[in-house]
Image (tube, rainbow, N blue to C red):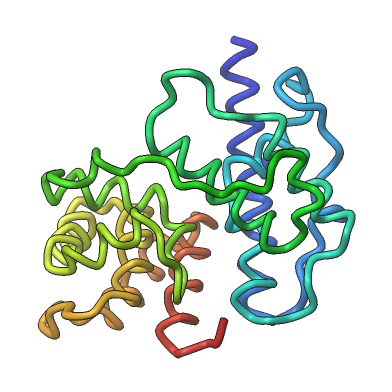
Amino acid sequence: MEQSGTSTRLAGAVQGLMSELVSALRSGDRFGLAGTVAQGNGPGATADPTLAAVRVVGADVVLPSVLLRCAPPASDDLTMFSRALHAYPPPAGAPPTSVWSHWAMRRALLRLDASLDGATGDDTEPEAAWLDDAPWQFLTHQLAVLAPLALPGEDCAVARAARRRPVDVARGFVRAVRRRDWLQAAGAGRWLVLLDEVPQTLGLDNGLEFVAQMGGEDARVAFQVEAAQLMRAGVPV
């Protein structure tokens, strides 16, 4: 029962954090993480899951600063980002998406303030062989989970896997919409705005609008659609 309550609090914290990030993307204002998220203490902080929420959201926590080129994150914000990164390392045997999400956070931190990484500064990529021959349905699901890696100019094994299969990602987007899986559709759409050779018949702009309309009450969906539309419009990074 306590675990269920903790999960509920974490889900609420994630929604609250994503709502603040959506507002930052729409307004262009700098997002103040330290002023939004209370101080947590890692895995033992069951009463306050907000630091865990930062880890769940991952590298997207700093997306407003990265995507909009507004003021860089304040030092307190980066310190909290670093605390979340180091408090929740992927355990042994963690799925590849968890390992890659952690890597994406480390890479973002190294780019913003390497002194806070607390390690060697090495951003060597994890392996991505699990995507090489993945069926298109599974590929789309994995890419949607790793939407924080969908950034203009990003070059990593996951991004290269997406670039090799634009038609499959488009098929996955359509499937997610038909299944009313708005979060997966939004994540896939974020990748599609960056890919070449996406079929024109997909109608991606209208598709993103539809996903926002149908799933936008979920702040995670709203955030991914907002990020996709900003990148689609050519916001410099």
Residue at 18% from the left image edge and 77% from the top image edge: 198
Up the image or down, 139 lies above or below 24; here it is above
Which image quadrant: the N terminus? Answer: top right
- Answer left or right for 211 relative to 230: left
Residue at 63% from the left image edge and 40% from the top image edge: 55
Residue at 83% from the left image edge and 48% from the top image edge: 79
> Which residue is at the front of the view, 58 or 229?
58
Up the image or down, 128 lies above or below 153; here it is above
**Which of the 4 quarters of the picture holds residue 129?**
top left
Residue 162: percent from left, percent from top: 26, 61
The residue lying furthest to the top in this view is 1
> Which residue is at the front of the view, 118 or 75?
118
Up the image or down, 153 lies above or below 74; here it is below
- Answer left or right for 150 relative to 89: left
Residue 9: percent from left, percent from top: 66, 31
Residue 60: percent from left, percent from top: 58, 58
Residue at 78% from the left image edge and 30% from the top image edge: 48
Which image quadrant: the C terminus? Answer: bottom right
> Which residue is at the front of the view, 166 or 48?
166
Question: How many marks are shown on the rendered structure?
Answer: 0
Up the image or down, 5 lies above or below 33; here it is above
**Which of the 4 quarters of the picture holds residue 138?**
top left
- Answer left or right for 77 relative to 7: right
